[in-house]
Amino acid sequence: MSILIKNIKELLQVRESNITIVKGEDMKTLPTLQNAYLIIEHDTIVEFGPMSDYEDYQADEVIDAKGKIVLPAWCDSHTHIVYAGDRSQEFVDRINGLSYEDIAQRGGGILNSAEVLQKTSEDDLYEQSLKRLNQVMQLGTGAIEIKSGYGLTVEAELKMLRVIKRLKKSSLAAIKTTLLAAHAVPKEFKDTKKKYVDLVINEMIPEVGQSKLADYIDVFCEKGYFDLEDTERILEAGGRWGLIPKIHVNQFNSFGGVALAVKHKALSVDHLEEMTTEDIEALKNSTTMPVALPSCSYFLSIPYTPARQIIDAGLPLALATDYNPGSTPSGNMNFVVSTACIKLKMTPEEAINAATINGAYAMGLSNQYGSICRGKKANLIITKEIESYNNLPYAFGDNLIDTVIIRGKIIN
Ligand code: NIG
Ligand code: FE
């Protein structure tokens, strides 16, 4: 199967294969090619260039992209799309005055989702999750990280991870899996949190390590959830099984989690709504990607990640959705890119870099995804006819996507 896309008004994010991360000032540049063509064979980008260099090519399918922009499909490096039911009642409770913390304290929040998930059959959970995955792919996401963390028992965490494995098998999207057993302290361990941490370390991590059901290890490092000591013990235990850290940190409080993650060579630190100068310093000269989740800030009405401070310090930044039933019931990367420009004051170039190449880096996938490069996977968004790529974040709430191609297949 081959596809030729011709007369592309502008081809975005054209990079050499050795570029796998974009930092600081460089994030302001989005390398583009005007009036271009691109050829896909099977699931791979094999050729592209200016139309003036185009030589006749017999493709199985030809797409005329006149007036349209082509860019890499979104790389969403932080989601919790495997969950059961929803928490729309808590949404209403928050409108009526309760805070996210109040709800968690009375046994709602993550524990509410865990209770529902434990009772949901594996097949049902798979079907609910597949629906969400297909929905976000239609919105342009081609690579995605998915976490466990709504199981909170050995059995239910494994159920979630098996569902992710099934999604991986059945979907064209590239999927990376993260074990987030330390997402909340289950009710039974309310007064014996250390015992739950022991369970995570002594049972869950070895079980998951042995069965190779996860790539990464995550902890909700936050006041009222897991402290620095818990986090360090869990990251060390994960490390023994080759699970690389990608952690939830600084969502509500900054207390050293970023430096701890860097010390453990975390691939990413995610949320960062609260950032101190020490946190920024800790990230300098590290290989850890800071990840902002602006839809979460929007939905919970909490501060936005200080993207300017991060990028202006010369650091990279990735953008992801955090799609989950409690803090972000949306997996729309187009909204994330728009919100990053409007609220985080990122330029469209910075936001697109953050949602493609840097997102791929934050999943360990940037050698295959996140830019237009010969030999990379053909994951592409073809926009409708638009004036410039600035219209993507500018027209927030509009769907400006015409066609999505994932691993060389047109999916809409
Ligand atoms: O990234 N903060 C921790 N975990 C999720 C929310 C989980 C939930 O409320 O269900 C997050 O925001
Ligand atoms: Fe999250």
Image (cartoon, rainbow, N blue to C red):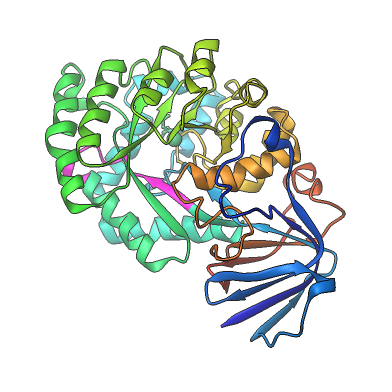
Assign ligand 1 to one image quadrant. Answer: top left
Residue 204 location, quadrant: top left
Question: Is residue 152 within the magenta segment?
Answer: yes
Whether residue 332 can be seen here: no
Q: Position of residue 62 (x, y in %)?
A: 71, 81
Does residue 15 appear to the left or right of 211 in the view shown? right
Q: Which residues lie in the magenta part?
A: 144-156
Q: Could you tell whether 184 is left or right of 9 in the image?
A: left
Q: Quadrant location of the C terminus?
A: bottom right
Q: Where is residue 122 shown, x and y percent of the image?
A: 26, 57
x 30%, y 38%: residue: 114
**Residue 41 image offset from top left, x and y in percent:** 57, 77
Can residue 215 be seen here? The reply is: yes
Residue 255 vs 182, above or below: the answer is: above
Which residue appears at 69% of the width and 36% of the height? 26
Query: 43 or 382: nearer the eye?
Result: 43
94 up-or-down from 223: above or below = below
Q: Residue at x 65, y 53 (%)?
A: 15
Q: Is residue 325 magenta?
A: no
Decide: is 314 above or below 227: below
Work out which quarter of the rendered image holds the N terminus and state it. bottom right
Nearer to us in this view, 217 or 294: 217
